[in-house]
Amino acid sequence: MNILVIEDNIRISDNILLILKNEGYNVVVEEHGDSGYKNALVNQYDLIVLDIMLPGMSGYEILEALRANQVKTPVIVLSAKSQVEDKVKALDLGSDDYLTKPFAPTELLARVRSVLRRQYDVASSSIHIGELNINTHTKELDISGKKIPLTSKEYELLEFLAYNHGKVVSRIAIGEHIWGESLDLFTMSNFIDVHIKNLRKKIESVANHKYIQTKRGVGFILKEEN
Amino acid sequence: MKIRTRLLIFFSGIYISILILFGTFFYLRIIAVLQQNVYEKNNEMVQMIQKAIIFQDLKNTDAIKEFKDKIPKMPGEMATPLERVWATFYTDDFQYIFGTNLAKKYPLDTSRIDLTKKSSRYIFENIEDPNFQSDEKNRVISVVSSMKLENDYIKVYLVTAIPITNEVKNFQKVGTTTFNAVFFLVIITIIAGIVFIQYTLQPIRKITHTLHSISKDDLSQRLPLINEQDEIGELTSSINQLLGRLEKSFYHERQFISDISHELKTPLSVMRLSLEPALNNDKLTDEEIEKIGVILENLYSMDVLIRKLLYLSRLEQDVCPFHPESINILDLIKKVHSNLHSLADSKGLDFKYHVSDKELLISGDNDLLYMALFNIIENSIKYTDKGSVLLLVESLKNYVSISVEDTGIGIAHNELENIFEKFYRIDSSRSRKQGYGIGLSIVKRIILLHNGKIEVESIPDVKTVFTLKLPR
């Protein structure tokens, strides 16, 4: 998952960067309101963490402008202001959640997960597909109760496919979400193929069915094979 | 030569020349005065002697011997004037006739002096006499004058010695003092000159220093304007105006690139967003969906290209954040290796690295260097279909050398120097390989930003070696 953090206080942004990166998210930090807005407008992110007090465009202005430009990326507003009016204003302008500083890392992560679930229309932090149980909170996979150890990239890949359960996910969408940086198609395809192969091996060694289907020339679908 | 040195030399030169001129003049004057003094003393003596012996009337040289009695003592003096002077009479052919007491006591050594000369210097040695002033070495320095006296009957030479020991001593003292004073003054002038020039030119140095920091950091800095009226103030104003123009033009260029990439990315983004849902459209055939997949991949590639272009242009304008830190090369290599070895494996290539030292530290930006290494190795893997890609890291005296050697299709000799140019891709059969020719430009720029060097050697169809040299 790609997250854009627009925050000018370096200590705070470094802190958030660390927290999110440890959870496996790809994070980009912008320190200035204007460049943050531009970035959000032009690139696709899964989530934006937005500070209100920024040099240049304020968080409110960015929010307003993004929504006016039909950018539907979910936004969590992060602010030191804790008055009711501030929260109401941010939510009404189009943010999806509001978190006051100082915040506990676990709370930030939980809200991120919650917002992402909503984005992908997933009901709870646990996703069940056939024998697969994916716990997005603990980042674990178990198949009919048996825990399957996955590398972080393998888990992210699986989780992304699970969020898009039943839908074709293009390789480039996978590449961008899991690896973030702009990889050449050639390299990216290779990375994806390797991880898909490993995932399949791990799943199929335990499960009774196949779950990761290949859509030729396009990408993959996670669904129970019938 | 620096301006301040030139100024210093010029003005010191003038000053010293003036001092020397003055000193010389002074010196010559004193000598003249001294000579005048001696001349007058001598004249006085000669006159006195002539009067005493009434030279006019002398008929023979014997009479000369009697003249000492003719001069009376002055009241209060212990000796007659004659006893205090040194005078000798010689014949025409320099035979001794008669001399005063002093002259008798301290005769001339005629081998050391030429009596035909009207005036010469002579030094009497070993003199200790209250009537004959000697110096601390018991020498009497004197001016010996030789005068021809003639009347109708006889011709004689009157030789007088005027001691100038004291005068010489004083003169020397004055000379030494003057010289010391001049020397001291010159030193002081030079020091004062240096200090003053330093002080005056200080603003220039401040400007140079500030300018140096401006070009590296940001262009919004301006030079402080101290004295608007003087030359340095005018220069400062001009430079500030220039900086203003530069800043504006850089800003415009950056805006341009950022605007262009925005303009290009927006439609691309729209296209991708509109097409992606089509992948899940049941009403489309598999073939049609596959075609849409191809379109999406191409759109993605364009997106990557634009992002790389933007990145390269930011690198070239030094706008990219550069966070230097101490980096262990081995860690960097390990990271790149673990991230790319699957790529090499997928092509059946052997991908290994060898590091000469476990601890190889250089100063640099971790993200940028990772990007550079990643790009070079990715490139090598892409252009190698069989064999191996080897990383060799060596520690040399002033730098670390990282060489990436592959057994790939290689680069023709005449194209070697061009591969780092933007968009340069070696033609024909390679065109199917993706890369857009920006990767190597990015690598080169990153290496240059680290004050390093990058070189490439290649034998077509055999191997290619990229060598990165990074200073420690």
Image: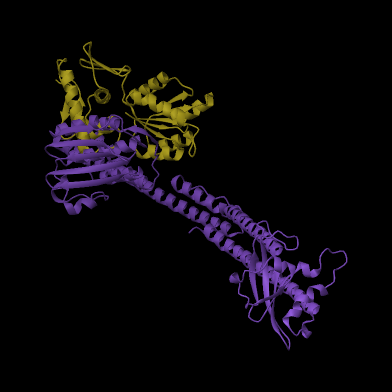
- Colour purple belongs to chain: B
**Spot occupied by residue B385 in the image (x, y as percentages of width and height):** 12, 39
Above or below, comparing residue B189 to residue B74 in the picture: above
Q: Nearer the viewer, residue B52 or A31?
A: B52
**Spot occupied by residue B333 in the image (x, y as percentages of width and height):** 26, 32
Above or below, comparing residue B254 to residue B123 in the picture: above
Q: What's the residue at 60%, 59% (across, down)?
A: B230
The quarter of the picture where the C terminus of chain B appears is top left
Q: Nearer the viewer, residue A191 or B145?
A: B145
**Spot occupied by residue B455 in the image (x, y as percentages of width and height):** 25, 46
Asked which colour scheme the image uses, the reply is by chain
Q: On the rendered structure, is B63 left or right of A154?
A: right
Q: What's the residue at 44%, 49% (across, down)?
A: B251
Above or below, comparing residue A208 to residue B95 in the picture: above
Extreme residue in the right direction? B75
Q: On the rendered structure, is B28 left or right of B282?
A: right
Viewer can see residue B163? no
For chain A, give the colour.
yellow
Viewer can see residue B95? yes
Above or below, comparing residue B82 to residue B398 in the picture: below
**Spot occupied by residue B430 in the image (x, y as percentages of width and height):** 15, 47
Q: How many marks?
A: 0
